[in-house]
Image (spheres, rainbow, N blue to C red):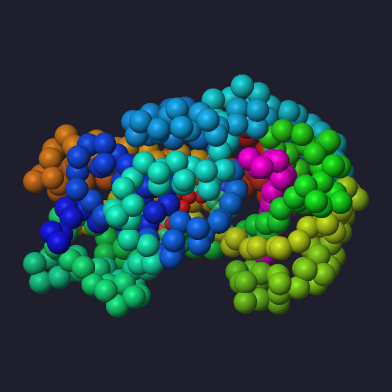
Amino acid sequence: MNTPVIAIIGAGPCGLTLARLFECKGIDYVVYERDESPESNRNGGSLDIHGDTGQLALRECGLFDKFMQRARYEDTVFAIADKAGERLLELGQGRDAPEIDRTDLRQILLDSIPEDKIKWGHALKSATPGNDKSPVLRFANDTEFSGFKLIVGADGAWSKVRPMVTRATPMYTGKSFIVSTIHHANPLYETIASKVKAGSSLSIGCGKYIMIQRQGDGSYRISFGLQAPEGFFRNGSVDLQDTEATRRVLLLQFYADWSDEYKDLVRYSTDFCAWPLYSLSPEDMGWESMQGVTLAGDAAHLAYPGGEGVNVAMTDSLKLASKIAEHGVNHIAQAVQEYEADMFSRAIDAITESKAMENVMYSENPQAFVDHICA
Ligand SMILES: Cc1cc2nc3c(=O)[nH]c(=O)nc-3n(C[C@H](O)[C@H](O)[C@H](O)COP(=O)(O)OP(=O)(O)OC[C@H]3O[C@@H](n4cnc5c(N)ncnc54)[C@H](O)[C@@H]3O)c2cc1C
């Protein structure tokens, strides 16, 4: 088999958007993905896809109509409350940033790419320069590939491609999400549904928050935004498999002074999952372009999830594919240099804005968040 021209590492929103754009532009590629199959990763959550970035990429992919079949414009509404449950503001009606479940977005992209272009069960262990300087990819399943004109690291927060181009590593933000879902069968479901209805509700107080967000199937995803030491909820003192113990910690250590309606969210939540949050810094952006390797999406510019991450990632794919199509695969270094120059400046803006969002989401009261959003 001939070696494809470009290897994409990671079949997340970034890697799959890039693959689809290469498919449309007739550029030869292969995708290596750690997951064993499309079904093995059901990581959920809902993503808002913005008109001038994520949606633009989907239009260029020829997938905008498919996106519109699943996009939820009714879920752009966003209520802000305090820890006593008093609503301060409702905004977001008619915003051109409809929600779509992460799993739906992945499926739309997967359906648009020939199955044999994605190599499932290929967890990259390392990428190192080979004798001819073109990178060698080594995978956990003991396979090894080389000879590509370009490797694109779209392998997310803990990219194994990143060390080839920069020493930057993500730093723990001091913040973690604990996530749970209130499904229809949950005794609290009707209460939540009648209160939140569509969209999201964000309640802020005493340096933490609770976000309730309606998902595509009508369930509500609850994110408890906490400040905790790194590893507190993973390998730390709290075992998330022990639901009762986790509820106790949340109620006693974090939400003791919140009103009962929020405490009920803790009491009825199950299947807790932790997301310790890491970020690169604006100073990390700007490595010297390296032959045959680049980064895109979270691998390039991981930031606190302030609502832009997936949109910036899909824009990276749009810009990189356009540059490669413009210069041709025989002038890929030029394409990568121009892509990176543009990506660095967008990434600096995105990380800076995410940091500002992080600060106001974990403030003492919701007013700082309201002021930031309304500025
Ligand atoms: C809890 C949470 C909530 C978020 N909410 C939002 C939101 O509401 N809006 C928003 O815009 N952004 C949000 N984000 C950020 C958003 O999810 C990311 O910015 C976006 O997914 C980046 O896409 P990506 O394709 O670059 O990386 P990822 O989505 O991380 O995809 C990386 C892919 O690479 C694969 N991979 C990883 N390592 C390897 C390896 N070694 N070998 C092969 N494959 C590998 C992974 O399995 C995955 O498929 C959130 C993030 C978190 C953590």
Confirm whether residue 152 shows in the render.
Answer: no
- Answer left or right for 108 relative to 221: left
Quarter-wise, where is residue 195 in the image?
Answer: top right
Residue 202 x, y percent position in the rendering: 72, 41
User: Which one is nearer the viewer's eye here, 90 or 123?
Assistant: 123
Find the magenta span and give its range: 209-228
Residue 230 x, y percent position in the rendering: 60, 69
Residue at 66% x, 69% y is 233
Above or below: residue 130 compared with residue 326: below
What is the quadrant of the C terminus in the image?
top right
Q: Which residue occupies the extreme top position in the image?
A: 94
What kind of secondary structure does the magenta stretch mostly adopt?
strand
Q: Which residue occupies the extreme front position in the image?
A: 115
Q: Is residue 225 magenta?
A: yes
Above or below: residue 57 compared with residue 334: above
Confirm whether residue 216 shows in the render.
Answer: yes
- Answer left or right for 191 relative to 345: right
Above or below: residue 335 compared with residue 281: above
Residue at 65% x, 63% y is 273
User: Which one is nearer the viewer's eye here, 49 or 19?
Assistant: 19
Residue 226 x, y percent position in the rendering: 69, 58
Quarter-wise, where is residue 348 in the image?
Answer: top left
